Amino acid sequence: MELLRTNITEQPFKSEQEEIVFFKEVKPVFCSLMMYHVKCYRMESRKPAGSMEAKLKFLHAELQEIDTFFASHLAFFEYYRSGSTAMDDKYFIRGRQDEHYSMEVQYLCSDLSFSTGYDLLIARLLANELLAADINEAIYNLQNNTTKEEKTGNVLHAAFQKGKGYVQTSYRAKELYVFLRSLVDAEGVINHTYKSFFELIVPGIANKQSHAFSPTSLLKYSDKVDMETRDNVKRLLQKMIRNIENY
């Protein structure tokens, strides 16, 4: 980050467009990785060492904080994710933030020569998306106690252990059941019943507890869906909605 700062000081931008690209596309990538790793370190140093319930409460609180952050800046994130450019000269040219300058952005922007504030919002967005994925997988691993490392509390470490072979998912059978059935019921699949759709799709899906699911095993959850399962699927759908403008 210091090298980036020195570079733009010694070699000023040649045009406003060059400055916009730097603060919209370049600096946030570097800054987001720094924010992500700092946050991972802080979480590991603050996570409770007690019961599974205490650890889950801690992780859910971290997710709620991320959700609140997204909701607080929804309009700006929709602008960024949609690829819009109409407000770029207000968001990503230094010193032009006037009436568009929120209090939080002012707080973030401690160095006016190296930030517009909004570049830091993008960095936080990117960092939080990485972190949310890790936390969701950590919650899943903790609930299922699949490895010795998870039982001793290193839940975030387990988030980086990726499986191979089948399509791997961090979601449980109940959550897969709800997601796939809702896809059929919403007419996202029009040439299958949910049972025949399961027979086509499910054998290629695995998680850390199941080398591969079977349609029969998944259909057993038809009367076992609880509120937690619904909430986890809703969270997945919310993440999909946030990301959809990238495609």
Image: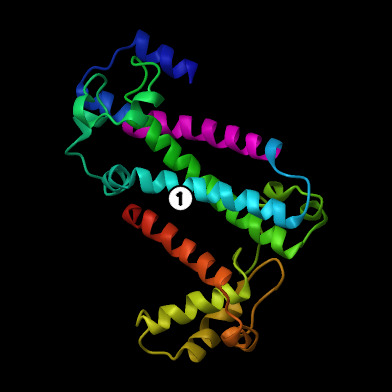
211 relative position to 184: left or right? right
Q: Quadrant of residue 208?
A: bottom right
**Position of 208 relative to 197 (above/below):** above
| Magenta region includes residue 40 | yes
Q: What's the amino acid at mark 1? A: Asp
Q: Which residue is outermost to the left?
A: 86
Tell me the residue at 59%/32% (across/down): 38
Front position in the image: 41 or 208: 41
Tell me the residue at 41%/32% (across/down): 28
Which structural element holds mark 1? helix
Front position in the image: 202 or 44: 44
Main secondary structure of the magenta stretch: helix
Residue 201 showing in the rendered view: yes
Percent position of residue 134, x then y: 59, 50
Percent position of residue 116, x then y: 31, 24
What is the span of residues highlighted in magenta in the rendered image?
24-44
Tell me the residue at 74%/56% (across/down): 52
Identify residue for label 1. Answer: 67
Percent position of residue 36, x then y: 55, 37
